[in-house]
Image: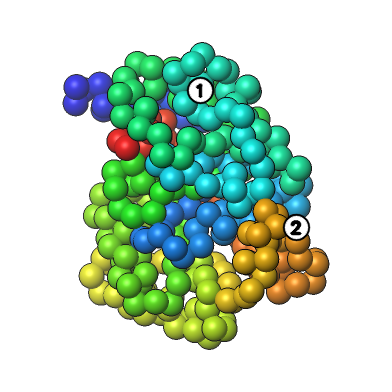
Amino acid sequence: MMQQGSDQAASLRQGTGAFGVKAKASTCCLAVASGKGGVGKTLVTVNLAVSLAHLNKKVLLVDADLGLANADIVLGVTTNYSMQDAIFRGKEIREIVLHTPYGIDLISASSGSKEMVSLGTARMAMFITDLLAFAAEYDVILFDCAAGIDSNVTSFLAAAPQSLIVTTPQPTALMDVYALTKIMYQNDLCRDIGLVVNMAEDDKQGEQVAETLNAVMQRYLSGKIDLLAVLPTTSDVDRALKKRLPLVEMLMERDVMTIKFKQLAQKIIDRHLMSEQRGINADSLMKGFINI
């Protein structure tokens, strides 16, 4: 079994997935996670996806929260099919993809479903093969991971060359971010880690959060996390959720939140272009689905 894993890893380093699929290096792949729930992770992911579409990027958003999927709610759309339909009911990837009105495509998970628990490796391998082949059509793939540090979350983080961690200035949220990044560094899951500080009083508070995290990470992990965006607390978030609209679609182009998400989107693209590691790690992606 270890030999098989070594062979798969070697094939991935050569640019070919473990299941015979060659990763598309030009596709930007990003996993968005958080140490704890309630920090606005899915809201950030959805609005980042829409902002990337505003930059004329073809975006695929995969709701990788296999237990509590809600990206469709934030987008204000209704999905007829989920990834479970592709895995268990014979649907093709193209059939389960929802084309949203905002220029992004969505693959949703079924909220509260435990069907994935009984998933076999062979069946999952077939789905991953189809997903990677299909994903090659896109400029950007975003995985909206579940909150926390479970193995299904860290597997998605390992699969993506870039990771984006969402937090708030609350001490409990910061402790959970450190716990998550500690696991990422100790297991060498991903070193290209960006930070979004959500619900901040102002930019200064967000910068202080990043400085605090980096001081601890540099001391104990010899690592760092790059501050990519500070998002202020605003009542517009609640208004957008009630209207079932992405925040950046509800607001004007000159609104501060719209500008910040556009800047974040551009930073993600720029970091991808400068990155040495590209493409999706198929082995880790499969583990992400299996380890629920």
Residue picked out by circle 2: 249
Figure check: 41 above or below 235: above
Q: How crowded is mark 1: few (under 14 residues within 10 Å), some or many (20 or more)?
A: some
Count of marks overlaid on the render: 2
Q: Which mark is residue 85?
A: 1
- Residue 179: x %, y % from top left: 28, 62
Q: Quadrant of the N terminus?
A: top left
Q: Give me the C-alpha separation between circle 1 and circle 2.
A: 30 Å
- For this orientation, the residue located farthest to the front is 242
Residue at horizontal 33 percent and vertical 41 percent from the top = 152
Residue 193 x %, y % = 44, 59
Instruction: Answer above or below: position of 33 versus 214.
Output: above
Q: What element carries label 2?
A: helix
Q: Which residue lies furthest to the top in this view?
A: 90
In the rendered structure, find residue 219 and report the number of the disc placed on it: none
SS category of the residue bearing label 1: helix
Q: Where, by quadrant of the figure, is residue 255 drawn?
A: bottom right
Q: Is residue 80 left or right of residue 8?
A: right
Q: In which quarter of the image is residue 271?
A: bottom right
Say if residue 188 shows up in the picture. Answer: no
